[in-house]
Image: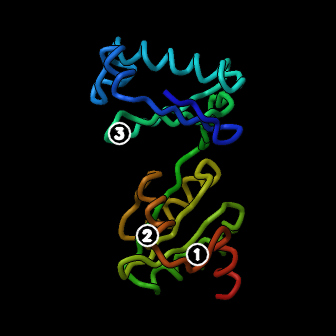
Amino acid sequence: MNIEQLDATRILISLGDRELESYDVTFENLSFSELRGRKLLREMLRRAANTTGIDLKDKHVVIEALKYEHGCLLLLTITDRVKKRRTYRIKYQNDAYLFLFGDAGSLLDCIRALYCMNGRHFSSSVYYYHQKYYLVLYGTASVGSRYLHTIGEFCISRKRGKAFNASLMEHARVISLKRAVETIGSQL
């Protein structure tokens, strides 16, 4: 057995066939799921810590085992214990409404009507995807039913959902982003 410190975070342990036989372990059952393998690995961690002087307490150790013709090599990589990654949940107040238009004329007529109704206070975007135009309204609580009825006169269909909206944002061509009704409506 040979224990060599490669750098401050890595230790190489060379185990011969005799050491493996003394613990009644083969390369195939050298893992923490096997009792004999676990006993050998813990002993090697203890010896590596004593030989090199590296403190393994509260450290994360990755063990890689490599087979060679006269035994195996154990490469120990030591890192500080990784803190649990924080997960943040994004809460949406409301979903977005997606309106499908068959042609640009009906989309522009709809935007003109919304602009004239003073429908500039809500966030909106326009996308072009698969030869169709989409008007997306965000913050749908502020849209109001009179705007939805007006849009319904011009659009082919109305959808609601995060999944299609995400797909549209990823794959569609952006015509106007965030303030589409105000930007396009002011030019009409």
Residue 138 x, y percent position in the rendering: 59, 57
Residues at circles 1 and 2 in contact by the CB criterion of under 8 Å: yes
SS for callout 2: helix
SS for callout 1: helix
In this picture, residue 151 sits left or right of residue 77: left
Residue placed under numbered mark 3 in the picture? 67
Pick the front one: 167 or 161: 167
Please determine whether, in this image, residue 71 is positioned above or below residue 99. Answer: above
Give the CA separation, mark 3 to mark 1: 74 Å
Q: Quadrant of residue 88?
A: top right
Instruction: Give whichever of discs 1 and 2 has the lower sequence position.
Output: 1
Residue under the image location 39 percent in, 40 percent down: 66
Instruction: Give whichever of discs 3 and 1 has the lower sequence position.
Output: 3
Residue placed under numbered mark 2 in the picture? 153
Question: Which residue type carries mark 1?
Answer: Ala
Residue placed under numbered mark 1 in the picture? 113
Give the CA separation, mark 3 to mark 2: 72 Å
Residue 146 x, y percent position in the rendering: 56, 58
